[in-house]
Amino acid sequence: MVNYKDYARKFLDECRDSLKSQSYPYFSVYIVDNASSEKSRKYLAQNYPEAKIVPRSDGNYAAANNAGIRKAIEDRCQYLVIANMDTEFDRNWLRELIRVFEKKEDAGLVQSKILLYRKEREAKINSLGNIINYLGFGFTSAYEEKDREIKGEPEIKGYASGCSFLTSREVIGKIGVYDEEYWMYHDDVEMGWRARLAGYKIYLAPKSIVWHKYEFSRSIRMLYYMERNRCLVIWQYYKLPTLILIFPALLLMELGIFLYSIPGGWFLTKLKADSYFLKPSTWLKIIKKRKRIKKIRQVKDREVVKDFSGQVSFQEIDNPVLKYIANPIFNLYWKIVKKIIIW
């Protein structure tokens, strides 16, 4: 788990208590203290002395997860779980993650059933697995739908939510750790896409329950990384013929977002995100990443993108232009293009 500044003061107590009550007893907790200070390290040590604290200074979320992963591997952990601290875990949360992973021989990642933290009201879903849109957007499935029983362990066709998923030391050894260039946001999109290209599948463990204290916010920092990383994952992962096919839709979407950002007051942030791709150093990094992906690729674009969504679904934002004009156009374009992709 990653702590950032005063995050632990808000969320650690319930999270810690639910971890201590797990029915699966053989695990260690690693808290990466991101943007660490003497004060935060002392607080963590006092309030969760059983946890292993890994200090980091720069606030890079992807790098923080890597620090925890590497420490766990160094300690010979067989399985690795990435989990948010703003959560409370069901007693069988960890046991069920491991059970499903061991049952599915082709599993690369297994995600928990994530519910919104509303115990005093009817339980609603946060995520049953996340969806990738072909233009790089990522969003949850079944958001705010009523909780329901799910039979079996269905495959997730998009990516596993970074709120709670399990992988193994062996899988990480093959696909690699987090890409630290992402810093924050879309890091789980990138990890899921990479796992699927390497031939692994992603599954839901519906009896591994997490209550997530989810809050949607649109900070400028969030918008910058979401926009930058949405485009970054496209340039890194699609094969060149696929990039050529989606480029008209990508160009139209970029224009639409830029125009939308002007009345929204964040067009300078959008410009900053786009300017990242004007740097030669960025393209050198993208080329190097594409070469690394080529080495682990076991699956064609066709197999991965067949399950990508043609629509953009921001559950927290009801935009009539997106709903009634943009989405039908982009969805129709994707239905046509998807049939052409054979590589």
Image (spheres, helix red, strand yellow):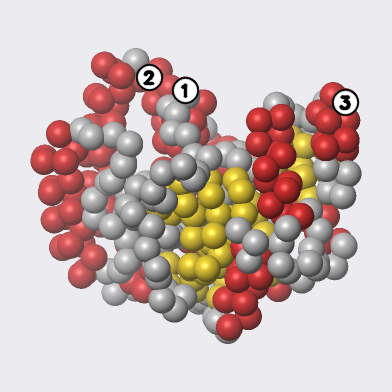
Dot 3 corresponds to which residue? 38
Comparing 12 with 289, the one in front is: 12
Query: Is 316 drawn above or below residue 333 in the view shown?
Result: above
Q: Amino acid at mark 2?
A: Trp
Q: CA distance from mark 3 to mark 1?
A: 28 Å
Query: Is 182 drawn above or below residue 97 in the view shown?
Result: above
Dot 2 corresponds to which residue? 266
Q: Taking 294 as reference, is 318 left or right?
A: left
Asked if the residue at tag 2 contacts the one at tag 1, i.e. Cβ–Cβ closer than 8 Å, the answer is yes
Q: Secondary structure at mark 3?
A: helix
Q: Amino acid at mark 3?
A: Glu
Residue at image position (81%, 58%) is: 28
Residue at image position (37%, 63%) is: 148
Mark 3 or mark 1: name the one nearer the start of the chain.
3
- Density class for disc 3 (Cα within 10 Å; few <14, some 14-19, many ≥20) is few
Comparing 143 with 296, the one in front is: 143
Residue at image position (21%, 69%) is: 340
Residue 332 is tagged as: none
Residue 220 is tagged as: 1
